[in-house]
Amino acid sequence: MAETFDLVLKGGTVVNHDGIAPRDIGLRNGRIAAVGSLGASAAGEVIDCTGLHILPGVIDTQVHFREPGLEHKEDLETGSRAAVLGGVTAVFEMPNTNPPTTNPDALADKVRRARHRMFCDFAFYVGATRENVDDIPELERLEGSAGIKVFVGSSTGTLLVDDDPTLERIFAKLRRRAAFHSEDEARLRERAGIRRPGDPSSHPEWRDEIAALTSTQRLVRLAEKHGRRIHILHVSTAEEMAFLAEHKEWASVEVTPHHLTLVAPECYQRLGTYAQMNPPVREDRHRQALWAGLSAGIVDVLGSDHAPHTREEKDHAYPQSHSGMTGVQTLLPIMLDHVNAGRLSLERLVDLTSHGPQRLFGIRNKGRIAVGYDGDLTVVDLKRQQTIDNSMIASRCGWTPYHGVTVTGWPVGTFVRGRRVMWEGEVLGPAAGEPVRFYEGV
Ligand code: DOR
C-alpha cells in the first residue's frame, strides 16, 4: 500500500551527508518520514521543488535578538522573522540582554517569551558571571539552554569575566561545550587610546590580532588543563586560525559571513561605523586565512553574530557608535553567493550550517535529512540573482551592511518541524517555535 504523508516536497535536489541527488521528501507529524522516489504516495500537500535545492535546516548558532530590555533594536519575534526569511530554521541566542540571561528565571522567561512567538526553533546561551559559577551544572541542563557563554573581552552589555580565578572556577564546572567571546580585556583597556575619534578604521588597530590571539591561547590552555571542550566564537585572525589548527582536540571554531566577506580598510571607507563589529573586520590577509581555515576543515560552524543596533546608535561618532550588524537574514544568501563563486562547495556549506552544529552541540533530531529527524528544511534557488536591499530586512533596525549587493543563490522556502513557515519571501504563520533539545541538556 502507498505511504501517506502530511506533506511531500517533490522533485528537488537534496544536499545531504550522502551527496547531492534528486529526491522527494515525505514529512509526517513534523518529522522526515521518507526520502527517495515517492511517486505513488498520497500526501495532504505536495510542493513542487523542481529546479530547487533542499538543504537540512540552517542552524545559526550565534544571534543577538535583544529581548528582554533592548526591544527598540530587535525582539524574539522580529529576529525570528528575519531568520526564516533567510532560510534559518533554528538559532542559538546570546545572553547580553537586559537583564542578562544569567539565572534559571531569566532563561525560563526567555523560553516563555519565545515559545510559539518565534517562527524558528531556539536555544538560549546562559552568561557566566562571578556570581553564578556554582549554578553552571544546573544552567547547562535547563530546558532551552544552549550551554554557557563567557565574554572574556567586553563587548555590548555588561557581561564580562576576565580574571583567572573565576575562569578557573568556571572551567572546573563546565560539562557541555562552552562558547567564548575571545579578546584580551587587559589589552583592550590598555590600548583604548589608540581609537581615533570619528575614524572606525582604527577599530581593528585597537582590538588587534594580539588581543584575539593571547585570549584564545589562554582559553585553550584552560581547556587543556581542565579537560573541557570550548567553542571560540567569531574567529577573526590569521594567527588564531594557525594556533587553533594545532588544538582541535579542545577547541571548535566559528567564523562569520562578515569576516569572510568584508575587508578593511575598504569596508570602513564605504560603510563607516556600519562595519564596526567586535571582533573587528580586518585586512585581507586575515580574510584569506579564514577561508584557508574553512577549506582545510579547521572551521566547524558558521554563525551570523546577528547584532542589530538602530541607525541612531550606529550614527554616533566613533567610538561612541555601537558595535554590531545584522546578519541572520543574509547568512545564507551571502554564503550561497560564495558557493556560486567557487569558494566552497554546497556540501561544505551544509557541513558548516547543519551537520557541524548538530555534531558540536549534540543537538537531538536536527541537522540532517534522514528518516526520524525533525522536518527542518531550507529550500534554495541556487541560480536566483537578487540584490539585497535594506527594505527586505525584517529586523527592527531595518538595515544590512550588504545593501545594494547582488548575490547569486537565494533561500526561497523554510520548513520548521514539517511546517512551511516561509515561501518566496513571505512569512507564513502561525509562529510555532520550540526549544532545541540536546543530548546533554533537555
Ligand atoms: O560587535 C558585537 N556586537 N560583538 C559582540 O560580541 C556583541 C554584539 C552585540 O551584542 O551588539
Image (cartoon, grey):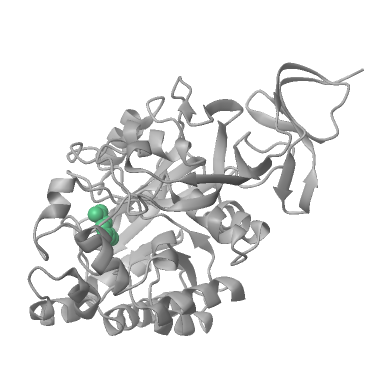
Q: Is residue 9 left or right of residue 240?
A: right
Q: For residue 197, what is the image quadrant?
A: bottom left
- Residue at the extreme right of the image, as rendered: 1
Q: For residue 133, what is the image quadrant?
A: bottom left
Tell me: residue 24, above or below residue 209: above
Residue 346 visible in the snapshot: yes
Q: Is residue 121 left or right of residue 108?
A: right
Q: Residue 92 location, x and y as percent?
A: 41, 47
Who is closer to the viewer here, 440 or 118? 118
Q: For residue 390, what is the image quadrant?
A: top left
Who is closer to the viewer here, 184 or 429? 429
Residue drawn at (45%, 67%), measured in percent from left and top? 260
Q: Residue 98 location, x and y as percent?
A: 17, 44
Q: Is residue 249 left or right of residue 435?
A: right
Q: Residue 188 location, x and y as percent?
A: 17, 77
Residue drawn at (32%, 49%), measured in percent from left and top? 400
Residue drawn at (22%, 66%), measured in percent from left and top? 161
